[in-house]
Image (spheres, rainbow, N blue to C red):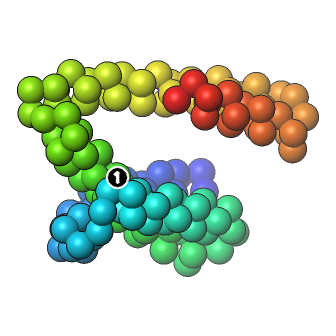
Amino acid sequence: WSDFVIAKMAGWFNALGFVWLPSVKYIMSKFRWSQSYTLLCVLNVVIIAIVMTKSLELQILGFTLLSFGRLLLFSCHHAYLIDVFGMGSFGTLNGISSFIAAILGFSSYPLQLLGLRTNYAISFIPIGVMVLLVA
């Protein structure tokens, strides 16, 4: 694992996520926003469960589902902003949401270090709740 095989696999699977375009197009045209986002949340919970396993074969399935989930997330997010707020506000709202996502992304590493330096089992719960409340 010292050659970062997991990180390399994730990069390849995310780069090939465009193969899911017909499925994402079908979901976005067939379902309402609430149904699409519910499907996305369930998919992410499944991905987390798969990633927590020790099986490399399941990890590959997890990366495959992650590439689908990322395409669905960004497609739903951008289409939702345009549909609800219009094209005139899209750039501003997309910039604000990207900024918030970047701040949360940059804060994840220090928060993980904090969780690992304290009681491992309990400290991730308040950190997760804090990130959820900030978002």
Nearer the observer, 3 or 100: 100
Left or right, 62 with respect to 52, comes to: left
Q: Which residue is mark 1?
A: 73
User: In the image, what residue type sits under mark 1?
Assistant: Leu
In the rendered view, tell whether residue 121 sits above or below residue 55: above
For the point 24% across and 52% down, which residue is it?
Answer: 75
Give residue 68's quadrant in the image. Answer: bottom left
Above or below for 103 versus 30:
above
Please identify the quadrant where the N terminus is shown: bottom right
Residue 116 can be seen in this image: no
Left-right relation of 112 to 16 = right
Of all residues, the one furthest to the left in this rendering is 88
Q: Residues within 10 Å of mark 1 (few under 14, many from 20)?
A: some
- Residue 117 image-quadrant placement: top right
Q: Position of residue 102 (x, y in %)?
A: 41, 26
Residue positioned 47% across, 51% down in the render: 7
Left or right, 63 with respect to 55, comes to left
Image spot of residue 34 (x, y percent): 39, 57
Residue 15 higher or lower than 117, as above or below: below
Question: Can residue 1 be seen in this snapshot?
Answer: yes
Residue closer to the observer: 2 or 130: 130
Coordinates of residue 98 in the picture (x, y in percent): 33, 28
**Relative to 122, 16 lies left or right:** left
Q: Residue furthest bottom?
A: 57
Residue at x 32% of width, y 56% of height: 33
Label 1 secondary element: helix
- How far across and down, in percent of the image, does residue 25 sit? 19, 68
Residue 99 sits in quarter: top left
